[in-house]
Amino acid sequence: MRRIRIIGIGAGHPDQVTIEAVRALRSVDYFITADKADKPGGDQLLAARQALLERHLDDIPPVVAVRDPERDRDPDDYDQAVVDWHDARAEAYEQAILGHGEGDVGFLVWGDPAFYDSTIRIVEKVLARGRVEAEWDVIPGISSLQLLAARHRIVLHDIGQPIVVTTGRRLREALASGAENILVMLNSTIDLEGFEEWTIWWGANLGTPDERLVAGRVTEVAVDVLTTRIEVKTTVGWIMDVYLLRKKP
């Protein structure tokens, strides 16, 4: 039976791919990845995945780039828009799998498949559609959360304290709930109003040659965060950033 392998490939640097992940990369017959070719300069993350494969594999299997379905970026119903997008991706992935025989397929997931990535959900949808039969597994990867902590040489929480992981869109909810240790991912913009007396540890494009870091009291470094963010997005063409906010006395 065909096998589907969802492989976490780390935050960007080829050295941060685990040995388990390398073994999984070497076990598949081809890879499927979404092609966001509509991005300025093409899909640079697709190129980064190709470079990672060249680093770890002697013979690189085919990489099937599936055009990412259109997604409503400002929907009236956000949750339904995401479901529709996932359904469209599942259909596209199903077609790609059926078009490549019975070989084992690998999905290359940036960071770790467990954190704000939908590949697991989409593969479940593919299998639920009933046309693809496969065994499947998930290989963890080094996440940007871990890399952020390593780069800033910090522990992500105070002793015995909880940590909230959320998105930029829902940061205000975390603040209103009383959270005092917040990790934030998936940021279209950054709004630090109300966090002036907090401490921030911020990182962009972690693990890549374009990595940037800023840390300090929000009131002192907020401008640096925002200007650096603009600089990275302008010069590189894309940005993935993550940051920790901690309430300090």
Image (cartoon, rainbow, N blue to C red):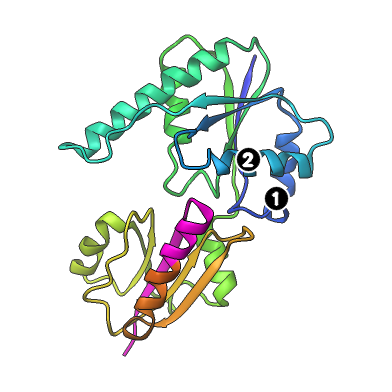
Where in the figure is residue 43, as x and y percent of width and height?
53, 39
Where in the figure is residue 35, as x and y percent of width and height?
51, 31
Ranked by sequence position, the earlier of labels 2 and 1 is 1
Give the amino acid at mark 2: Ala
Taking the spot 63% from the left edge, 44% from the top edge, the residue there is 48
Judge left or right: residue 172 versus residue 189.
left
Residue 248 is inside the magenta segment: yes
Give the amino acid at mark 1: Thr
Where 50 sits versus 207, above or below?
above
Say which quadrant the N terminus sits in. top right
Residue 18's disc is 1
Where 2 sits versus 234, above or below?
above
Residues in magenta? Answer: 229-249
Q: Which residue is the extreme one toward the right?
A: 58
Number of marks in picture: 2
User: Which residue in the structure is indicated by mark 2?
Assistant: 47
Where 210 sits versus 50, above or below?
below
Judge left or right: residue 133 versus residue 182.
right
Taking the spot 46% from the left edge, 57% from the top edge, the residue there is 234
